[in-house]
Amino acid sequence: MIRSLFELLTFLIFLSTISRVTGLGSVLLIDFEQVTSGSTWENAQRYCKEHFNDLATIYDHAQAKTLYLKKYMAWIGLHRETSTNVWVWTDGKNHGIEWGWRESKDNQSCGAIGYHYYNYRKIYINNCEENLFFACQRNTTGYPFIKEMMTWSQAEEYCNNGNNGLASFATWDMTFFSEQNFPIWIGLHRNGGSWRWSLGLEEDKHWNLNNPSNDATCVTISSVTKELATKNCKTQLPFLCTKDNMVLVKENKSWEEVFEHCRGLRSSSNSNLQFNLLSVKPGDEHTYVMNKVMEADTEEVWVGLRFLGDEWLWVNGADMLYTDMLQCPVSNKHCGALSKNDAGTVEARDCSERKNFLCYSYNP
Ligand SMILES: *[C@@H]1O[C@H](CO)[C@@H](O)[C@H](O)[C@H]1NC(C)=O
Ligand SMILES: *[C@@H]1O[C@H](CO)[C@@H](O)[C@H](O)[C@H]1NC(C)=O
Ligand SMILES: *[C@@H]1O[C@H](CO)[C@@H](O)[C@H](O)[C@H]1NC(C)=O
């Protein structure tokens, strides 16, 4: 209960602090996308760059804990005989179970089980050339679940070496396919003597990586415990991509032009989305944004910082948290840019210089 005016005022000040931090401090939204079909580290990186943003950068243990990473797909011993077009289990029987998977595409002839949110399990028919985890047929200790990814026929061959082949099910006994703690590629790898994130930034403070063997130079996060571990980069594993709401526009424009350009952007998939010049926070967020800056054609990129009246302001109204900007910038140097030659701050530049620029999208 709030008992006095003093307490009420303290409470209101507390509330406004929260909304300043969460509302105006940061406009950057970072999200993750787990790809359940596996790849080597290098191919995973290529895939993430093409479809999302990059392999994931995980800044600290707190962020790691918030990740939901348990979904996976595993091959089972179900496939379509190409000669007869009949669905069979690898033990040669059709166990008489109606799975509801028959309407698959021509090139999708192999069965996998999917473990998803809330323990939801389902049989899927996939392209046999995809790399998935797999389960071998039950022996006395259960269905061995293999935490490496292979194509369906490679998996079948692997399981046949232990004699029983891929797992076949006579009943809807899916309880075996439970939560698994498996490794997932993230963007950290060893480059020379140091550990670096996918786009080149050095990892120096958050993770304590030891590297017992020389061929284990790429890093995974485990799906349940969220621990980081090194592995041979050629191993096929699922991977985690990052996506965010930044847009780097590789056109050379003056600051006034880029201000208009960002606000004029529209999304083809979401007509509600609006755009503005990016504001940035010092620290980890600055470091994250620098990844994007390094992709630019120009040495520097414009962001939404402007010297107006007698102070530096973000044009979207975000709080100005950089403390080392000159309070009286040289005439003309009234616009803010991030430089590839980064000193951890925003540089004051002549607004008429032509540079690439960073916009961001938001739901108004
Ligand atoms: C499956 O085949 C169709 C055409 O038959 C093709 O368009 C598609 O890309 C193929 N998919 C894969 C994953 O190979
Ligand atoms: C059953 O499979 C597990 C995992 O592959 C293996 O360690 C174990 O030796 C197998 N047991 C028998 C009796 O074959
Ligand atoms: C922008 O400027 C950079 C550096 O001067 C140049 O390399 C690049 O080709 C220019 N881009 C365009 C689209 O003109």
Image (cartoon, rainbow, N blue to C red):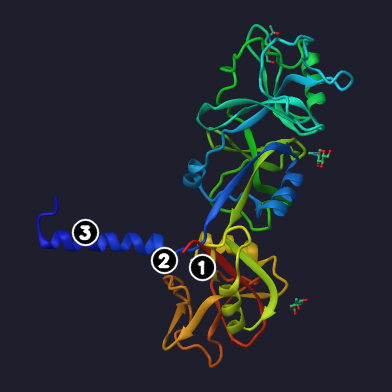
In the rendered image, the residue lying farthest to the top is 140
Q: Position of residue 308 (x, y in %)?
A: 45, 86
Which residue was labeled with disc 2?
24
For marks 2 and 1, give the one nearer the viewer.
Answer: 2
Which residue was labeled with disc 3?
11
Instruction: Please report the residue visible at 76 percent of the width from the left and 25 percent of the height from the top.
Output: 110
**Earlier-in-chain disc, 1 versus 3:** 3
The answer as to whether callout 1 falls within 8 Å of ligand 3 is no
Q: Quadrant of residue 181?
A: top right
Q: Position of residue 331 (x, y in %)?
A: 53, 93
**Earlier-in-chain disc, 3 versus 2:** 3
Residue 27 in the figure: left or right of residue 181: left
Say which amino acid is labelled 1. Val
Which residue was labeled with disc 1?
280
Instruction: Please report the residue visible at 57 percent of the width from the left and 31 percent of the height from the top.
Output: 116
In the rendered image, the residue lying farthest to the right is 83
